[in-house]
Image: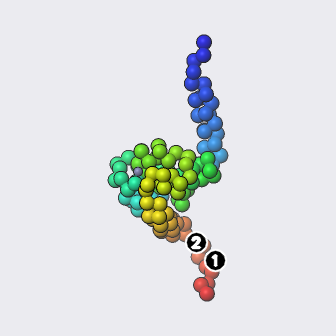
Amino acid sequence: MPTGGSKQVRAARKRKKRMARVVNDLTDAQWNAIKAAWGGCAYCAAPSGSLQKDCVQALSRGGRYTLGNVVPACGSCNASKCNAEVTGWLRRKKLDERRFLVRHYEISSELTVLFVTPPADDATPVA
Ligand SMILES: [Zn+2]
């Protein structure tokens, strides 16, 4: 008698394998700083209390859990976006694509400066 759900089990196993391969170098301190910088859901600006890590570039598209690729998302945005390409999804949801991209750029550059210290004697002179 078929029990059902075996497909789900297989999918979960596949997902686990994929997760093991990716580089997930986001620390708790970085995640807290990302949440503080956005001050709510990165996509719809909802000041949700339970924000989830969302990869701007989905894992299935080569994205990683890294400082420049993770933003806080409310449950509904996270579930809705899933593996969609971010700009197309924002447009479909009638969310402000430009606002998101500009803020994402600003926040990730800011946090990169904060968390990634460049080697001191490798400074390139500004022409
Ligand atoms: Zn949202």
Label 1 crowd bin: few (<14), some (14–19), many (20+), radius 10 Å: few
**Residue appearing at x 54%, y 60% in the figure:** 68
User: At numbered mark 1, what does the secondary structure look like: helix, strand or loop?
Assistant: helix
Q: Is residue 29 visible?
A: no
Scheme of colours in the image: rainbow
7 relative to 16, above or below: above
Q: CA distance from mark 2 to mark 1?
A: 8 Å
Disc 2 marks a residue whose amino acid type is Pro
Would you say the beta carbon of the disc 1 residue lies within 8 angstroms of ligand 1? no
Residue 23 point in image, percent of width and height: 61, 51
- The single residue placed furthest to the top in the displayed view is 1
Front residue (pair 21, 102)? 102
Front residue (pair 44, 15)? 44
The circle on residue 118 is 2
Q: Is residue 101 visible?
A: yes
Contact check, label 2 and label 1, Cβ < 8 Å: yes
Front residue (pair 88, 72)? 88
Disc 1 marks a residue whose amino acid type is Asp
Q: Which residue is mark 1?
A: 122
Residue 112 point in image, percent of width and height: 52, 66
The circle on residue 41 is none
The quarter of the rendered structure image containing the N terminus is top right
Would you say the beta carbon of the disc 2 residue lies within 8 angstroms of ligand 1? no
